[in-house]
């Protein structure tokens, strides 16, 4: 009798692992992804659309779930926009080592033009937006390190480059 009871319990437990479960999380309705960065959400995403190489790339093996940095020409200014998105248990994320590079048209070597301050949020998503007046006859791009931190011993960094914009 004990053997049959043990076999029934083990069978029920194994069967319960096979059944898929769906969990739902409730939000407070606020848009945690959007920050007040001085331009509209549509303008921000139109700049991000310039860099189809990165897109909002999925990176599922670590703390960062999506990232992109992109450049665009916004009314004659160089606009740099980016997103770093982490898992919901990430407590700090953002951008480090943000560098704008330029090169003359037809040249093959990039030169560091300027650097930006690191940008972080104490949440699982961070947006970046900066615009610059730049000189003509150059191509520009940006690169940075996307950063996410769960706790002191659990961080992730991913380097990425933007698309190239001509002026």
Image (tube, grey):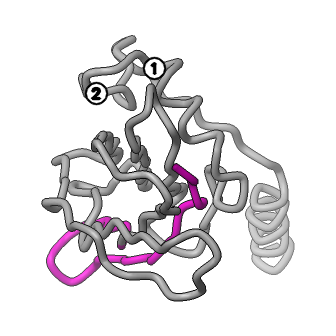
Image vertical order of residue 44 relative to residue 49, above or below: above
Residue 149 shows in the view: no
Q: Which residue is painted at 45% across and 77% down in the image? A: 159
| Image coords of residue 148 (percent x, y) | 32, 65
121 left or right of 50 in image? left
- The residue where tag 1 is placed is 41
Q: Quadrant of residue 86?
A: bottom left
> Measuring 84% from the left and 59% from the top, which residue is drawn there?
18
Helix, strand or loop for disc 2: loop
Question: Mark 2 = which residue?
Answer: 35
Q: Work out which quarter of the rendered image holds the N terminus and state it.
A: bottom right
Task: Please give the name of the residue rendered at 50% of the width and 49% of the height, measured from the top-left corner.
Answer: 71
Write down the region rendered in magenta: 145-167
Q: Out of 165 and 94, give the one closest to the viewer.
A: 165
Q: Nearer the viewer, residue 108 or 162?
A: 108
The relative height of residue 28 versus residue 155 in the rendered view (above or below) is above
Q: Is residue 143 left or right of residue 70?
A: left
State yes or no: residue 162 in magenta. yes
Name of the residue lying farthest toward the top: 29
Which of labels 2 and 1 is toward the front? 1
Kindly identify the residue that appears in the image at 51 percent across and 38 percent down: 73
């Amino acid at each position: 009798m004990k053997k049959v009871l043990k076999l029934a319990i083990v069978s029920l437990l194994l069967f319960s692992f096979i059944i898929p479960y769906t969990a739902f999380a409730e939000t407070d309705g606020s848009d945690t992804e959007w920050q007040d960065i001085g331009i509209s959400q549509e303008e921000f995403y139109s700049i991000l659309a310039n860099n189809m190489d990165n897109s909002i790339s999925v990176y599922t093996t670590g703390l960062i779930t999506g990232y992109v940095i992109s450049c665009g020409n916004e009314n004659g200014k160089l606009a740099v926009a980016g997103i770093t998105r982490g898992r919901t248990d990430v407590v700090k994320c953002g951008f480090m080592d943000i560098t704008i590079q330029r090169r003359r048209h037809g040249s093959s070597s990039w030169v560091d033009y300027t650097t930006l301050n690191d940008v972080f949020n104490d949440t699982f998503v961070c947006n970046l937006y900066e615009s610059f007046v730049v000189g003509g006859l150059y191509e520009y791009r940006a690169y940075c390190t996307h950063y996410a931190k769960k706790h002191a011993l659990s961080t992730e960094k991913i380097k990425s480059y933007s698309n190239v914009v001509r002026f």
